[in-house]
Image (tube, helix red, strand yellow):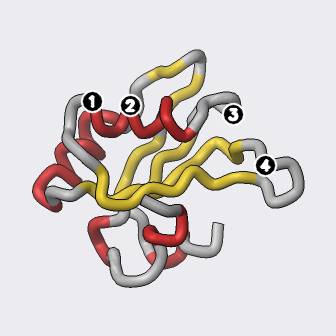
Amino acid sequence: MSSSDTAGSEGSGRIFVGGLPYYFTEEQVKQLLESSFGPLRCFNLVKDRETGNSKGYAFCVYEDPLVTDIACEALNGIMIEGNTLQVRRAGWNMISM
């Protein structure tokens, strides 16, 4: 899975995950997303171009599209390390974030 895989034709199956602790690694975020809901087809932890540090949000697409709404509902609003996750379907207006 490469970060460029989340661009383009993923459409309404794309999920925005915001409020992530900045120090979480890609593996930690993937584990959070996959542990209860199954494998991801695409994943992108957005990072600062200059520093390479996480910006605290990610995009993903589950292999099973039926999991999308279930994962959004279950993960949205949970607290992780003092941060409240914001998890929802990604709209086209979020692509340039």
Mark 3, residue position:
22
Separation of residues labelled 2 and 1 (CA atoms): 6 Å
Mark 4, residue position:
52
Q: Please tell me which residue is depicted at 40% across the width and 26% down the height of the picture.
A: 78
Q: Amino acid at mark 3?
A: Tyr
Query: Quadrant of residue 72 in the image?
Result: top left
Separation of residues labelled 4 and 1 (CA atoms): 25 Å
Q: Amino acid at mark 1?
A: Ser
Residue 15 in sight from this viewpoint: no
Q: Secondary structure at mark 1?
A: loop
Question: Are dots 3 and 4 in contact, CB under 8 Å?
Answer: no
Q: Residue 93 location in percent, x, y?
A: 53, 76
Mark 1, residue position:
35
Mark 2, residue position:
32
Q: Please tell me which residue is depicted at 68% across the width and 29% down the height of the picture.
A: 23
Separation of residues labelled 2 and 3 (CA atoms): 14 Å
Residue 71 in sight from this viewpoint: yes
Q: Above or below — where is 89 with respect to 34?
A: below
